[in-house]
Image (cartoon, coloured by chain):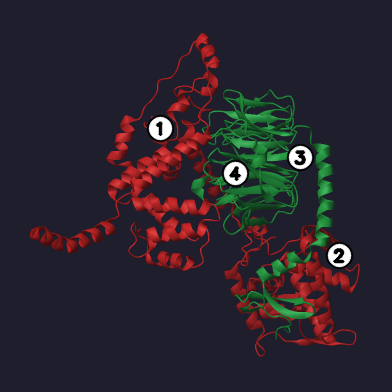
Chain colours: A red, B green
Amino acid sequence: MTIRNVLRDHGQRYRPRMACLKKVEKVVLEMQDPTTGVKLQPQRLVITTIPHAITGEDIVQICLFYSEARSFGSMLVALGYIYPIQDHKRLVVKPDASLYRFQTPYFWPTQQWPVEDTDYAIYLAKRNIRKKGILELHEQEQYNHLHKWMNHKWDFIVMQAKEQYRAAKERKKPDRVVFDCQERAYWVVHRPPVRTHTCMFPSLQKTFTFPSVWSMVTCFSLHCRLVKYCATYKGHDPFLSKCLPSNPWLTDDVTYWALNMPNVEIPTKMRVERWTFSFGELLSDPRGRDDFRLFLKKEFSGENLAFWEGCEDLKWGTAATMKEKAEQIYKTFLARGAPRWINIDGKTMEITVKGLKHPHRYVLDAAQTHIYMLMKKDSYGRYLKSPVFKETTKKAVCPEEHKFSDSQLEQNARNRRPSLSPIIIRQQEQEQKAKMAASAPVDITQVMSKLSQQGKEAPPRRTSVKND
Amino acid sequence: MCDQTFVAATFGPCDSCSKPSPLMNIYIKNEATNYCSLCVEMMACQGLQKGETLESLKRESETLKKKLEEERNKLNDVECNVSVILCWPILIVWDAFTLNKEHGVPLPCTWVLACAYAPSGCAIACGGLDNKCSVIPLSLDKNENLAAKKKSVAMHTNYVSGCSFTNSDMQLLTSSGDGTCALWDVESGQLLQSFHGHTADVLSLDLAPSETGNTFVSGGCDMKANVWDMRSGQNIQSFESHESDINCVKYYPSGDAFASASDDATCRFYDLRADREVAVYQKDSIIFGASTCDFSLSGRLLFAGYNDYAINVWDVLKGTRATILFGHENRVSRVRVSPDGTALCSASWDSTLRVWA
């Protein structure tokens, strides 16, 4: 079963420029003013008369108040606020007697209705029902494409199309004509045939409005960013620099791997250097995280890292235990009087608490980001200058490069041994975690309450001793 | 005066789930009702059970025919340092250093197209033409029948082309020939999120490096590479500049760019912040499609495997080819750099895995 999110941001494709559109809307509303707006006239079809049509000439006249009248008028048509009745496929204003109408607000682009493929499929199916063979070539192609990719909903689409067709037949003829025009105009704007210019696709818009200077600047800054990253990590890339003491794949000697085990006591100098590149590097290396944890313990802000780890566990953990985990984290870190209370601002706390009423795996995201940023901007900087880090750097080893002779290399090849299985490593890690949980930091509030309780109990005991 | 209004956008409680939200007018059994778009979607998809199986069977048989024509006997895929080979009908976990086979899992007669190693190293996921992706927990006991512990996690309506664990062993991300990607909870097999937007088969996916958040990129036969937000299921960015199917997408180590390899014999480099293609790696002498790509640890080198049996190594910054690696006797299907960056492993249709350092 597919579940789609209700409010969709369609990324590059369907993002009308809201601010600009709101301004256009204001103009359109002014144009519709009965006294000062555009002159209306009825349109005569064979027998029926349809009111509220406007001529192209009049549109241009009104737009003369704004410069570039004709192109402005064409823009209004291209965006979908006004649609041509006669030549409905060309979205321009012709300053003659050709007729246009104002589009109903339901179909305005600012309505923020996502332009759903489902609606388009229903529209095409409806037209197909009305008269077979009426679809244009590009519409036919789209119809076939949608039929293939929305097959799972096709019954629903056909049913809706039939119902809408039936409902439309119950309307009066002029109303029907008007609604058909409105709908057709809406879809000409939002689903133009391929290779026609449209206002709705910002990607096309970019090529028109981007000055070349801006794009050169972005390219330059982008290149600098990549060059910087590559230069920073060049020394650490075994394909580009020497691997100390030696690349195990080349010499069959596993010292390199032994020195860089995830939870080794003494890290190598290269590894410690990597921790200084970014906070993310420090956290993603288990040895680095341990060092950081030690530093935070000395600063009495260990709860930040513990909270962050708890949130990661919640996000990536199994769905079954998610609710309990979220509640546990709340009790331990967020609730008033919690044993390891973390310091987040009022607004984030409010959002988090509200979200926890219906917990889902991303409910603590806001708080987690806040704490992550706090650690990154504050604790990380101090960690790099701290005695803990300096100590680690001093103790870090820098192994000598191996220089094996041919016979030694042969010997190494014969002595290849398998490494520890990941299953055993995981068992060891779990034992380690259990040990750490047992010696968890002391909970200040509980200690205080214990002391106060002891104070209350003490006197009776002393009197009993005295009596004895 | 503007046109008459026949339809209006309303906001209010949905007729089926009673939650206040923007409403859509739809017809159910000749009556007009107002549903929120989520209920509309659910109703639309549940309607069709009978017709759907017929259609999906037809589609499945078409793709199977295509696959059988193209695919050869043995298909390979690669994980780093300890390698996983997919070979009908066995899945082998190698210790690439000692050349020992650590685990072997006989599989029922299906074609396996994708595999992944769990972050802890204690389980593997594999999927393919059986439309499923299964997770197999590994054990120390060599005699244990691992195939019996196999557990189906992902269910798609077409073949599974790629799979990857997220930051833990508990969640699995898959991409499929039915044009969707999906995020699954391994323990319960529940679908956590699905990602719609491709208009053709999705051939590969890659997760962003952990510091940069919850996104992943997917590439498909519609020549588009899409970047998705895992939380909401939205398509955040889309890049369409290839001229043929995208076979493989891979994030740059910093997480704010990615590369793609395609049947049009080029690899392209896209930057996410600038939102555009930044480089094209191509040469007149390269006419065969690229099936796979991966970055070295610093991101300076891009290793790409091609159907002309060679691996071209591109200098990412200069845009030129640094070197070629020859050795395989048939198409290179997958290349991966080990997590510590010390070696490159390549898998090929000549049924060998080669490690380069």
Left or right for A284, reference B350: left
Which residue type does callout 4 highlight?
Phe
Left or right for A347, reference B258: left
- Residue A364 in sight from this viewpoint: no
Q: Which mark is residue B258?
A: 4
Q: Answer yes or no: are tags 1 and 3 on the same subunit.
A: no
User: In whole angstroms, how far apart are the C-alphas of marks 4 and 3?
Assistant: 32 Å
Q: Earlier in the sequence, mark 1 or mark 2?
A: 2
- Image point (69%, 60%), residue name: A2
Q: Answer yes or no: are tags 2 and 3 on the same subunit.
A: no
Which residue type does callout 2 highlight?
Glu
Q: Earlier in the sequence, mark 4 or mark 3?
A: 3
User: In whole angstroms, how far apart are the C-alphas of marks 1 and 3?
Assistant: 42 Å
Subunit of label 1: A
Q: Secondary structure at mark 4?
A: strand
> x, y percentage for residue B211?
49, 47
Which residue is farthest top?
A407
Q: Answer yes or no: are tags 1 and 2 on the same subunit.
A: yes
Q: Which mark is residue A136?
A: 2
> Disc 1, disc 2: CB below 8 Å?
no
Q: Which residue is mark 1?
A: A264
Subunit of label 3: B
4 or 3: mark nearer the eye: 3
Q: Local crowd at mark 1 within 10 Å, few (<14), some, or many (≥20)?
A: few
Nearest to the observer: residue A245 or residue A136: A245
Q: Which residue is mark 3?
A: B110
Which residue type does callout 1 highlight?
Val
